């Protein structure tokens, strides 16, 4: 395609579109608004033609800026609305977690099974931890360090550190799921660390301390990690098996938008988990009381997802962006 001839043929339309964009929308007549929409669609088609047939960088950049400006004028932002926040937490977030339930449950089941197996192996073979830890380090871990970890810093500082660390791990699992292996590696590393520490504690007769401290916050914390990893792996699967009616790009885009909803929704849930780990886990309360608090928080999250997400799913609702904000397909021939 002759780029110069193409630009000369359509340059007047592009200039007219720029002229309309420089004016306030409220100052445009109804006929000019219709003209703006038509010129925007033509410019978008022109951009697609240039990109597919002759990707000239200068013309592509100029048309991209023009199309983005026209899109902003044609579909202006509706602004911030509290109703949108409410819908996010009552519908969008629980719906996406609910729909990814099999992926999350599968990820969690595999992680727990692997961790239990590693704990059993390490506990039954005392020479294994000696390959990575000295006898003094093992004694210190069993008698002091494991329990002291939760109270070694000010609760608010420790809680913030835990929150950001868990959010980072969840983000890695979710984002790297698109290429599958990195997410699996992160889960493996966490299962390996849990198996080693748990095996040392169990092997030295401190099973009660290990479980009483871990389960208080770990039920909710690990569930968040399983959700992030499950959704991330679902994104990866979307380009491996997009289905018969979608291209790989469309499948990944839809799964990626779903992943973004889950990523945002997990932030406050991980905050709750961090608060429990910082203030409840090390608290001088009976172990049963602390376990009840952790279990209630965990069951509350599961009930929230099952009830709210199930209602939204059965009602046929969606957490995706409006159709106008999704990718558009236009003929270029």
Image: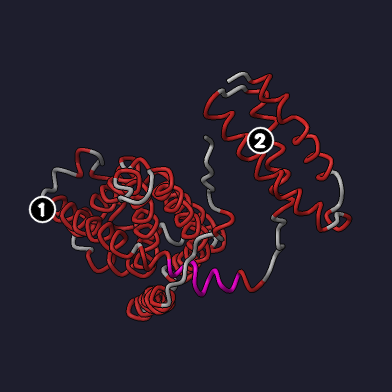
> Does 193 sit left or right of 58 as displayed?
left
Say which residue appears at 54% left-offset and 48% top-offset: 328
Q: What stretch is highlighted in magenta?
A: 85-95
Q: Which residue is the site of mark 1? A: 124
Does residue 131 belong to the magenta stretch?
Answer: no
Q: Which of 203 and 34 is in front in this view?
A: 34
Residue 185 % position (x, y): 30, 42
Q: Name the main secondary structure of what is drawn in magenta.
A: helix
Say which residue appears at 10% left-offset and 53% top-offset: 124
Residue 230 % position (x, y): 34, 56
Residue furthest to the right: 27
- Location of the N terminus by quadrant is top right
Q: Image height check: is 211 above or below 20?
A: below
Q: Nearer the viewer, residue 194 or 248?
A: 248
Q: Which of marks 2 and 1 is nearer the N terminus?
A: 2
Residue 300 % position (x, y): 41, 78
**Within 10 Å of the Cα at label 2, are there few (<14), some (14-19), or many (20+) other Cα atoms?**
some
Whether residue 201 can be seen here: yes
Residue furthest to the left: 124
Does dot 1 land on a helix, a strand or a loop?
A: helix
Whether residue 284 can be seen here: no
> Does 73 sit left or right of 180 as displayed?
right
> Does 260 sit left or right of 295 as displayed?
right
**In contact (CB < 8 Å): disc 2 and disc 1:** no
Q: Which residue is the site of mark 2? A: 64
């Amino acid at each position: 395609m002759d780029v110069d001839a193409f630009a000369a043929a359509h340059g007047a339309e592009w200039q007219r579109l720029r002229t309309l964009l420089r004016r306030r929308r409220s100052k445009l007549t109804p006929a000019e608004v219709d003209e703006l929409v038509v010129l925007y669609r033509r410019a978008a088609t022109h951009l697609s033609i240039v990109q597919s047939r002759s990707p000239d960088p200068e013309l592509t950049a100029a048309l991209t800026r023009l199309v983005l400006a026209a899109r902003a004028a044609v579909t202006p932002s509706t602004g911030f609305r509290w109703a949108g926040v409410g819908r996010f937490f009552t519908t969008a977030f629980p719906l996406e977690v609910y729909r990814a339930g099999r992926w999350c449950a599968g990820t969690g089941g595999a992680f727990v099974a692997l961790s239990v197996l590693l704990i059993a192996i390490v506990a039954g073979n005392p020479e294994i931890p000696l390959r990575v830890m000295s006898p003094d380090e093992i004694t210190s871990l069993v008698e002091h360090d494991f329990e002291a970890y939760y109270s070694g810093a000010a609760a608010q500082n420790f809680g913030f550190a835990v929150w950001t660390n868990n959010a980072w791990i969840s983000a890695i699992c979710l984002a790297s799921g698109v290429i599958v292996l990195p997410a699996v590696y992160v889960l493996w590393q966490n299962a390996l660390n849990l198996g080693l520490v748990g095996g040392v504690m169990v092997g030295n007769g401190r099973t009660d301390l290990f479980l009483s401290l871990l389960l208080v916050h770990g039920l909710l914390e690990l569930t968040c990690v399983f959700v992030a990893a499950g959704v991330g792996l679902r994104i990866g699967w979307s380009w491996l098996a997009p289905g018969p009616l979608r291209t790989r790009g469309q499948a990944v885009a839809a799964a990626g938008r779903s992943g973004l909803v889950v990523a945002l929704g997990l932030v406050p849930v991980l905050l709750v988990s961090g608060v429990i780990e910082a203030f409840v886990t090390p608290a001088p309360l009976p172990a049963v009381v602390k376990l009840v608090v952790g279990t209630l928080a965990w069951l509350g999250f599961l009930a929230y997802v099952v009830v709210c997400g199930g209602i939204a799913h059965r009602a046929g609702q969606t957490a995706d962006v409006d159709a106008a904000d999704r990718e558009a397909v236009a003929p270029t021939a």
